[in-house]
Amino acid sequence: MSAITHVGLAVPDLDQAIDWYRKVFDFYILAGPFNFNAADENPSAMTLDLQGEELKKMRNVHLMSSGGVGIELFEFQDPTYYNESYSPHAGFFHICLVVDDLVGTIEKAVQYGGKQRSKIWNVNKGKPHYLVYAEDPFGHIIELYTRSTSEIYGNQ
């Protein structure tokens, strides 16, 4: 058995990102924020093994949704990594969250600096199966559903 427990996202400002995900999606802080400074660590520290020896300084936090899926936010401070170019259609593309109030969530996302990227789409005519693409203030695409993936796409 496998299950997604969390998604890790790099952001340029950890405090701003925590605030945005809390206000828009009601995520709560599960653990952290943590500060990492390689100068204070043992050379065999787990963080250096996971992130690479070139990492000198970072902050991170684990946020959790009421549905049990988390987001781990990373602010890489030295080196920053944030301005690395990437292809938006290769590798990681978006995360998807189920929300109770699709329109209200989009309104909050925009109010706090995010964007609505698409129209609201009804996936299955006659059923309350809606989706929309949004974006956080840091450029991460967030797909919002009104129901679970299995309910929307199962038994079509």
Image (cartoon, rainbow, N blue to C red):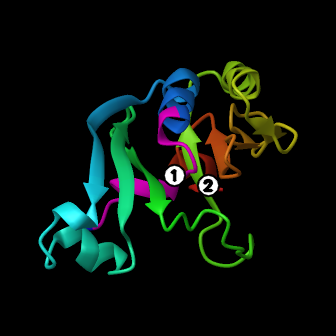
Q: Which mark is residue 25?
A: none
Query: Is there a contact, CB below 8 Å, between mark 2 and mark 1?
Result: yes
Q: Quadrant of the C terminus?
A: bottom right
Label 2: which secondary element: helix
- The answer to whether 104 is drawn above or below residue 17 in the figure is above
State the image coordinates of residue 82 (x, y, percent, origin top left).
Answer: 61, 62
Residue closer to the observer: 12 or 105: 12
The residue at the point 74 percent across, 76 percent down is 87
Q: Position of residue 122 (x, y in %)?
A: 79, 39
Left of 79 or right of it: where is 142? right
Mark 1 residue type: Ser
Please give the range of residues in magenta.
Answer: 2-15
- The reply to whether the magenta stretch includes residue 14 is yes
Query: Disc 1 on helix, strand or loop?
Result: helix
* Mark 1, residue position: 150
Number of other residues with Cα within 10 Å of mark 2, as a class: few under 14, some 14 to 19, many 20 or more: few
Q: Nearer the viewer, residue 6 or 61?
A: 61
Camera-side residue: 7 or 113? Answer: 113
The residue type indicated by label 2 comes to Tyr
The residue drawn where x is 55% and y is 33% is 16
Separation (CA) of disc 2 from disc 1:
5 Å
Residue 20 part of the magenta segment: no
108 above or below 79? above
In the rendered image, residue 45, in percent from the top left (x then y), is placed at 16, 72
Q: Which residue is painted at 32% across and 60% down in the image?
A: 3
Q: Point out which mark residue 153 bears.
A: 2
